[in-house]
Image (cartoon, grey):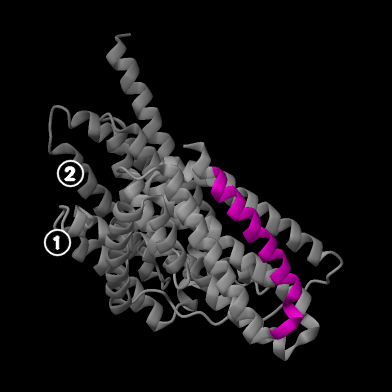
Amino acid sequence: MPESNVNLVIDLAIALALGLVIGIERDWRERNFKGGRRPAGLRTFGLIGLGGGVAGAIGARFSAFPAIGLALTIIVLTAAYWRRSQDGEFMGLTTIFAALVAYSCGVLAVTGMQVPATAAAVIAAMILGAKDRLHRFVRRLERSEIFAALQFVLLAGVILPLIPNQSLGPYQAINPFELWLMVVLITGLSFAGYIAFQSTSAKRVIGAAVLGGLVSSTATTLSFARLARKQPELSAVLSVGIIAASTIMFVRVCIIASVISPPLGLRLLLPVGLVTLASAAGAAYLARGLASVELEKPTISHPLDIGAAVTFAGLLGVIMIGSRALEATFGAEGVYAISVVSGLADVDAITLSLSRFATDDLAIGVAAAGIMLAAITNTLVKIALAAFAGGGVLRPAYAVLGAAALIGVAAAAFTVGVD
């Protein structure tokens, strides 16, 4: 048998398999139809996928054939659904569109795009199988959250492509496109954490602290501190939550740095890892013997807002110019100074700024040390805020975070010595 025929048989087998992947989910989902009469099940979807493969193969000679086959698939499925609707059964359109995906995957499989076809079939099956979870997720969304998601689409899909991609300003420190791309990165990461925080049904303190810390570790810390003042008997478990929320910030900045400058992310692994291990050990020690406690989640507003994004972009631009100016004037000491000052209010901006410059001519060790100093400064600020809001009942959390901060300072000094 010619090699081309062997390859075609393999491609058709893949097309059949992809149809079956989607068909398994549809067959399971529609298993409760009266008398077992499903409009389209495992065998039907297998044939649809195989039919797409055959149409794709014929399309090599007759380019219109895949479109003809797709039209026939739509007509047949629509007729089947119309017939079922005459019996008084409500039929959704999901299966029809799933069949179109199966057919299209079959076509792709025989036209040299087996990997995209497989990915599309698996993703389609996952989306179909997640019906109940997706519906529960949507029911939990508030109008403000839907509007926030639309704002993110505006930030990333409309505004970003319109921004010029060139270096401007003093020291050529600002590239408007890269600046806004960083804003999109931060807002996207924060919003993803917020959605995860809002959609989870778990109210246990550690889960709430970690997810809340991804969005705003400061807001989460203050929320737990205020609760500790009202309910001192929960101070031990709330101390663990504050440690978790503050520590996840270090992980977050490491992720951000890794996205922009992978070498910088690798350099941060050691100091961030040491701080995380120290905090985790302290939290585990405080959590020993504690009973499982459920609390109300901290109140955290969604992080997406056009005005806030513009303000953050302005702050980031100022820090970028300031970092360049101080580095040019004072060297590494200038970078450390602005890192500490920035850390008093925000860690994301200085993390983005130093990560961007680490891809140019700023020493990676200096950038890593600056990011760690900002995160440590911000941790000390959270300790002060928690002490003001919660009082002395949270001393164990202050002690653990203070010790972790000292370890972070030593690790930051080490990162500079590596260069």
Q: Position of residue 324 (x, y in %)?
A: 29, 55
Q: Earlier in the sequence, mark 1 or mark 2?
A: 2
Check the image and name the residue furthest to the right: 289
Against 97, residue 228 (above or below) is: below
Which residue lies at the image location 33% right of the left edge and 39% below the top edge? 116
Residue 67 marker: 2
Find the magenta span and give its range. 391-414
Q: Is residue 396 magenta?
A: yes
**Residue type at numbered disc 2:** Ala
Image quadrant where residue 46 sits: top left
Distance between the Cα atoms at labels 1 and 2?
36 Å
Residue 181 spot, x, y in % from top left: 28, 58
Looking at the image, can residue 31 be seen?
no
Decide if residue 128 is on the left or right side of residue 9. Answer: right
Please tell me whether mark 1 sits on a helix, a strand or a loop.
helix
> Quadrant of the rendered structure where residue 197 is?
bottom right
Does the rendering let one see residue 192?
yes
Of 21 and 205, nearer the camera is 205
Q: Identify the residue position indicated by label 1 in the image.
A: 162
Badge 1 crowding class, 10 Å Cα cut-off, few under 14, some 14 to 19, many 20 or more, is few
- Quadrant housing the N terminus: top left
